[in-house]
Image (tube, helix red, strand yellow):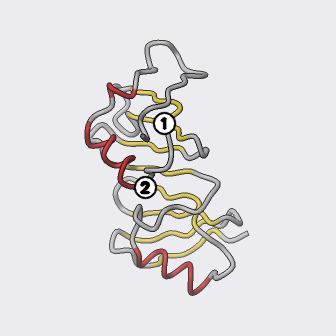
């Protein structure tokens, strides 16, 4: 099961928590979108309203949730599951960057979204998943 493996590294003792301490909403998100992965590290800092829950999975993916338990940042090295962001953004990448795939996603202060491709290119989208521009190398 996804939530079975626990290792805690590189954290202050007061920040690291067992998986059992994660809210059910976050456990469900991980089970739904990353069912083949296990949690290897968790940090909970409820004094930080932007990224209160930080989770690292065994495939190197990092997930950050805010204090409302809403996903705010996904950072990985492999292709993101199509279930974690809008199909409209995935289709944009498939059409305009057919040789690349999405490795990261981030919500920026609730006004725009940014995705990172495997070639380190960043693409920005509005909250309606409309393309805004890119930070092209």
- Left or right of 49 in this view: 56: right
For the point 39% across and 47% down, which residue is it?
A: 30
> Horizontal and vertical percent for residue 47?
34, 25
Give the vertical position of 88 relative to 47 (above or below). below
Q: Nearer the viewer, mark 1 or mark 2?
A: 1
Q: Circle 1 is placed at which residue position?
A: 39
> Horizontal and vertical percent for residue 108?
43, 55
Give the vertical position of 26 relative to 100 (above or below). above
- Left or right of 24 in this view: 110: right
Find numbered disc 2 in the image and state the secondary structure of the residue it sits on: strand
User: Which residue of the protein is positioned furthest toward the bottom in this rendering?
Assistant: 95
Q: Circle 2 is placed at which residue position?
A: 108
In three-dimensional space, the C-alpha distance between marks 1 and 2, rounded to whole angstroms, equals 25 Å
For the point 42% across and 40% down, which residue is it?
A: 1
Q: Earlier in the sequence, mark 1 or mark 2?
A: 1
For the point 59% across and 60% down, which residue is it?
A: 103
For the point 30% across and 46% down, which residue is it?
A: 28
Q: Which corner quadrant of the image does residue 113 belong to?
A: bottom left
Q: Which corner quadrant of the image does residue 83 belong to?
A: bottom left
């Amino acid at each position: 099961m996804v939530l079975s493996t626990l290792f805690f590294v590189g954290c202050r003792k007061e920040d690291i928590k067992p998986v059992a301490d994660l809210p059910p909403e976050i456990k469900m998100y991980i089970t739904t979108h990353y069912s083949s992965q296990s949690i290897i590290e968790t940090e909970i800092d409820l004094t930080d309203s932007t990224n209160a829950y930080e989770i690292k999975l065994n495939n190197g993916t990092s997930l950050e949730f805010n204090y409302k338990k809403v996903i705010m940042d996904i950072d990985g090295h492999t292709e993101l599951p199509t279930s974690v962001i809008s199909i409209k953004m995935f289709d944009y990448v498939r059409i305009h960057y057919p040789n690349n795939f999405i490795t990261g996603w981030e919500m920026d202060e609730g006004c725009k979204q940014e995705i990172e491709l495997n070639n380190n290119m960043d693409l920005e989208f509005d909250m309606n998943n409309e393309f805004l521009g890119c930070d092209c190398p």
